[in-house]
Amino acid sequence: MDSEKYKKCASEQEEKFESICLRCGECCGALDDVCVNLVKTKTGNRWFCKEYNDRFKLQKTVSGKSFRCVSIREHILNDTLRPNCAYRAS
Ligand code: SF4
Ligand code: SF4
């Protein structure tokens, strides 16, 4: 596979993987001590990360606790997905 085809294929796979997320916000603490970067969409029924492209570093919750944001792949590998996470069924 040439480099352009590989990039296109990788980008499509990434998009497909990201589209599984329901944006419930549970993995970012929406049900308890939420990450300061998590904000609600205008309709108010979904969440998004305002630092998504720069998220993998130390972050804080609204109560001031520090934590390191990790990828969903890392949650899958470590079996730490939230009970209702859409990636459990995928
Ligand atoms: S930084 Fe990480 S934990 Fe915080 S809202 Fe973004 S994705 Fe969620
Ligand atoms: S818990 Fe799963 S479905 Fe919900 S926002 Fe996090 S990754 Fe997406």
Image (tube, rainbow, N blue to C red):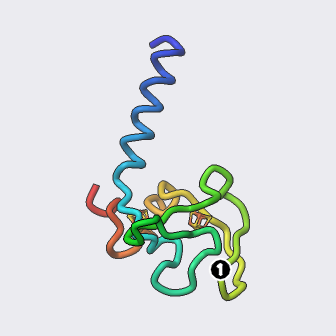
Q: Please state the total of marks drawn on the protein image.
A: 1
**Mark 1 vs ligand 1: CB under 8 Å?**
no
Residue 3 lies, in percent from the top left, at: 54, 15
Q: Is residue 54 above or below residue 81?
A: above
Q: Nearer the viewer, residue 53 or 10?
A: 53
Quadrant placement of the C terminus: bottom left
Specify the farthest residue to the left.
89
Residue 1 lies, in percent from the top left, at: 45, 13
Residue shown at the point (51%, 62%) measured from the top left: 48
Residue shown at the point (73%, 67%) measured from the top left: 58
Residue 12 lies, in percent from the top left, at: 40, 32
Specify the farthest residue to the top.
2
Residue shown at the point (51%, 24%) measured from the top left: 7
Q: Is residue 18 above or below residue 47?
A: above
- Determine whether, in the image, residue 54 is placed left or right of residue 12: right
Residue denoted by label 1: 61
- Determine whether, in the image, residue 23 is placed left or right of residue 84: right
Q: Nearer the viewer, residue 90 or 22?
A: 22
Residue shown at the point (70%, 83%) measured from the top left: 65
Rendered-image quarter of ligand 1: bottom right
Amino acid type of the residue that numbered disc 1 sits on in the rendered structure = Thr
Residue 56 lies, in percent from the top left, at: 66, 57
Q: Nearer the viewer, residue 41 or 13?
A: 41
Specify the farthest residue to the front.
42
- Determine whether, in the image, residue 24 is placed left or right of residue 74: left
Q: Is residue 87 above or below residue 83?
A: above
Query: At numbered mark 1, what does the secondary structure look like: helix, strand or loop?
Result: loop
Mark 1 crowd level (few <14, some 14–19, many ≥20, 10 Å Cα): some
